[in-house]
Image (cartoon, grey):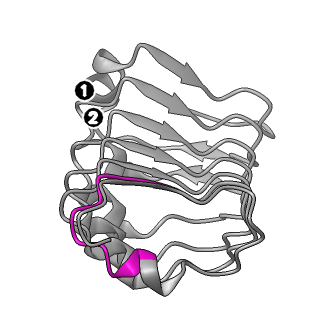
Amino acid sequence: MSNLQAIQQNGRGLTSVPDWILQTSSLTRLSLRKNRIALLSRDVCQYPLLKCLDLSENELVALPPEIGLLTALQSLLLAFNHLSILPRTFGLCVNIESLDLKGNKLTNVPFFFTPFVRLTRLDFTNNVLQVCVLYDFDAVISSLKTSALTCNSGAKV
């Protein structure tokens, strides 16, 4: 199984990432949506080729700082979890094109989104955003094709 490039384990009631997944070295796509994962193992962040990670509809409360090691990551789907903050190291994922964070508990859009010049899709819908601070807002929005910040509690940009 070490040569698998894509794995889908959706809706299986998983509370953690199975060991057999962590033993695959050539993974480019991992989908674990609709499970019960609350804490993401830092071992998931050891895939240098990972381009798409779908952890939507889990119970995630935080991401490990090692998320920044996923520099090839292009699509990160984290919708409908319990995230209230993103680690600073997330800014190292400079190849992100699609980022879905809708339905979490995020209170702000952190400044480290400025390196994401490839970002074409951004969704912060249904969070509890209060502040959106981007030091180079023009650079971020110039590449966006789709963005959503609706249904937040008084977000200020």
Q: Nearer the viewer, residue 96 or 32?
A: 32
| Residue 25 percent coordinates (x, y) | 23, 71
The residue sitting at 48% across, 83% down in the picture is 41
Q: Is residue 78 above or below residue 139?
A: below
Q: Is residue 147 above or below residue 122?
A: above
| Residue 84 percent coordinates (x, y) | 66, 64
The reply to whether the magenta stretch includes residue 13 is no
Residue that protrudes farthest toward the top in the picture: 145
The residue sitting at 73% across, 26% down in the picture is 150
Residue highlighted by disc 2: 136
Picture quadrant of residue 58: bottom right
Quarter containing the N terminus: bottom left
Label 2's element?
Answer: loop
> Which amino acid does the dot numbered 1 rest on?
Ala
Residue highlighted by disc 1: 139
As drawn, the label of residue 26 is none
Name the chief secondary structure element in magenta.
Answer: loop
> Which amino acid does the dot numbered 2 rest on?
Asp
Q: CA distance from mark 2 to mark 1?
A: 6 Å
The residue sitting at 22% across, 47% down in the picture is 94
Magenta span? 21-30
